Structures are given as structure tokens and as C-alpha cells.
Amino acid sequence: EDQVTQSPEALRLQEGESSSLNCSYTVSGLRGLFWYRQDPGKGPEFLFTLYSAGEEKEKERLKATLTKKESFLHITAPKPEDSATYLCAVQGYGGATNKLIFGTGTLLAVQP
Amino acid sequence: GAGVSQSPSNKVTEKGKDVELRCDPISGHTALYWYRQSLGQGLEFLIYFQGNSAPDKSGLPSDRFSAERTGGSVSTLTIQRTQQEDSAVYLCASSLEYSGRVFETQYFGPGTRLLVL
């Protein structure tokens, strides 16, 4: 069964203090791994898609990396506006579906 | 351009009543998905539409839940005889049609917050 586990559940950083969020996954053939950001009371906002091990993508202070078993979301010199819940999801092969399997997210708080 | 829209944004209902939730996907997106997000839990897949057909309904939790899509656009999720455990945020997403190795990104709407009293 496809599964996604995110850690830590919550993370508090000081402004400028870099860190990483982890997403471990098991899937029967990875089609894609997705990172989303979700602000309170809103729907998830797309950040990145990674397709194969070794791939990296960057956007502003965020960088996502992928291995065969996990993905990391690195946050460099975060700002308070980076505070949000970060969601990881995988899309696997199998069946006539494009559904995403989500982890429970990491709640990030960046203190000024 | 316009993103995915959902209505209503909030819905409060009494146990046993039926509710309808609406999703307007991004124009041109042929794939549409419904997910549910309960407090403290991850997003849970409910149903996937490709055009007007639903190749994957495996996430619908019971026969009280149904969904339809008409004209390859708007979708309605209906919950009959609502129960308190149905309280959650219902999220809709849409994507371009799957093509080759490009697995199209799903873009989410703001969600409908359902509270069953």
C-alpha cells in the first residue's frame, strides 16, 4: 500500500535559521512526488513536482530534493511569511487513477 | 487566469440532511478530483473524474457519498443523510489530461468547510 510519512509534525524556526523537512514514502512505482504549501483556511498551493531520484528543484528560499525513498524540502534563511503547513504527496502507478497520497504535513512556524 | 472555485465556502447542516458541494475546475482541465481533509489527518482521496466518467471511486467512504460531473466541467459532490463524522474540509482539484510521461499537477480550490451538527 502506498504510504507517505512526514517529519517533523511541527517545526519552529527563528527567522534566518535554515532547516529541512522530510517526506518518506513507499509506493509501487513512483510517477511523481509533489510538495504543496497550505495556509490556514485555504487549499493547498502547488510548489514542486519531482519525478526521479537525484532531481532537485528550487523556488526562492525553498529547494526540494528526491531520493528513492524520501524527499527533503530545504528552507534557507526562512522568513515569517514562510510559516505554513507543508504537504508532501506521491502519485504511483497502478490502476486508472491519478490520485495523490498525502502525508499529514509539517506545520512550520518562523518567528521574527 | 481563474483557479479552481468551490461553493459554498462554508456549510453548516443538521445530522440526517443532504448536502451538495460544487466545484468549478480550471478552464480546459479535463481531470477533476475530490479529497477530504479531516482535523489532524492528511488529505484523503475520494473520487477522480476524467471527463464525465469516474474511473476511480475507491475513496468514497460509503454509499451516502456520490459525485457527478457534467459537460466535462462542473462537478457536484453529494452527501446524503449526513453524519457528524462527515464534518471536514472537502477539497476539489483539477489537472490537464494525463499525457505521456508528464503527470500533470493538480491545482486545488479553497475547499468547502462542512460542519454537521
Image (spheres, coloured by chain):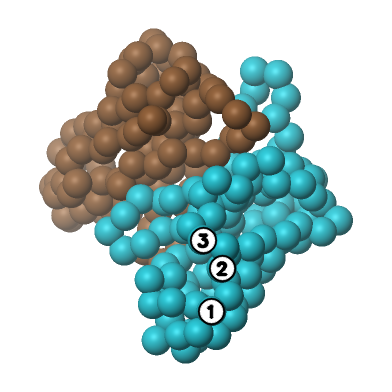
In the rendering, which numbered label is found on residue B64?
2
Give neighbour class at mark 2: few <14, some 14-19, many 20+ (Cα, 10 Å). Answer: few
- In the rendered structure, which amino acid carries the disc numbered 2? Arg
Chain label for disc 3: B
Q: Name the disc covering residue B96, or none.
A: none
Q: Which residue is mark 1?
A: B81
Q: Colour of chain A?
A: brown
Position of the N terminus of chain A, as image quadrant, is top left
Residue that protrudes farthest toward the top in the picture: A54
Image location of residue A103, percent across then percent down: 34, 41
- Secondary structure under tag 2 reads loop
Q: Are marks 3 and 2 in contact (CB under 8 Å)?
A: yes
Q: Are marks 1 and 3 on the same chain?
A: yes
The one nearer the camera, A20 or A87, is A87
Between residues B64 and A11, which one lies in front from this camera angle? B64
Callout 1: chain: B
Q: Quadrant of residue A16?
A: top left
**Residue that numbered label 3 is attached to:** B62
The tag earlier along the polypeptide, 1 or 2, is 2
* Mark 1 and mark 2 on one chain: yes
Question: In the figure, is residue A81 to the left or right of A58?
Answer: left
User: Can you say whether A88 is above or below A55 in the image?
Assistant: below
Q: Residue at x 31, y 63 (%)?
A: B39
Amino acid carrying label 1: it is Arg
Q: Residue at x 27, y 36 (%)?
A: A5
Where on the picture, by quarter, is residue B100? top right
Residue B22 position, x and y percent, is 66, 68
Q: Which amino acid, by three-letter code, is at mark 3?
A: Ser
Which chain is tinted cyan?
Answer: B
Separation of residues labelled 1 and 3 (CA atoms): 11 Å
- Image coords of residue B69 (percent x, y): 76, 57
Q: Residue at x 86, y 56 (%)?
A: B71
